[in-house]
Image (cartoon, grey):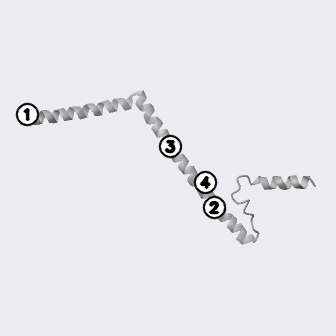
Amino acid sequence: MKRLFWVGVGVAIGVSATRKVNQAAHRASPAGVGASLGEGLRELGAGLGAFGAEVRAGMNEREQELYSLVEDTTEIPIRPAMVGDPDPGRHARAARRGAAGR
């Protein structure tokens, strides 16, 4: 009975060791390295995307703070269409076109 137990333990250790060696060999192979590199690049891209979103959110928040500060200190209202406008130069170009047409 003791021998059967130790044979079972030896088989389990042998199977476990063989699987670990095969996994290490796969990771060291070109396919394994490529998969690992691809996964790392995907994680890096996701991290950069999240960082960019955080930066944009912070920039928008700070922009709103600055607009509020300018409105409070100068008592000049800023038109809401200009706040957060993706093309702020559009207003200046429209004004120049209107003045040129006169």
State the residue in front, 73 or 92.
92
Marking on residue 62 = 2
Residue sitting at the far left: 1
- Which amino acid type corresponds to the residue marked 3 in the rendered image? Leu
Q: Which residue is labeled 3 in the image?
A: 44
Looking at this rendering, what residue extends furthest in the right direction? 102
Rounded to the nearest whole Å, what is the CA distance between mark 4 and mark 1?
68 Å
Identify the image quadrant of the N terminus.
top left
Is label 1 in a helix, a strand or a loop? helix
Near mark 3 (Cα within 10 A), the count class, few <14, some 14-19 or many ≥20, is few
Residue 57 place in picture, x, y as percent: 59, 56
Work out which residue is located at the far top of the displayed protein and give it. Answer: 30
| Quadrant in which residue 88 is drawn | bottom right
Quadrant in which residue 24 is drawn:
top left
- Mark 4 and mark 2: Cα distance apart in space: 10 Å
Q: Which mark is residue 3?
A: 1
Q: Secondary structure at mark 4?
A: helix
Sequence-first disc among 4 and 1 = 1
Number of residues whose C-alpha sits closer than 10 Å to that of mark 2, classed few (under 14), some (14–19) or many (20 or more): few
How many residues crowd around disc 1 within 10 Å: few (fewer than 14), some, or many (20 or more)?
few
Marks 2 and 1: which is nearer the front?
1
User: What kind of residue is marked 2?
Assistant: Arg
Disc 3 versus disc 4: distance between alpha carbons?
18 Å
- Label 2 residue SS: helix
Disc on the earlier residue, 3 or 2 = 3
Q: Residue at x 28, y 32 (%)?
A: 19
Q: Which residue is mark 4?
A: 56
Alpha-carbon span between mark 3 and mark 1: 52 Å
Q: CA distance from mark 3 to mark 2?
A: 27 Å
Q: Return the x and y of residue 60 as percentages of the image width and height.
A: 63, 58
Position of 86 with respect to 21 (left or right) is right
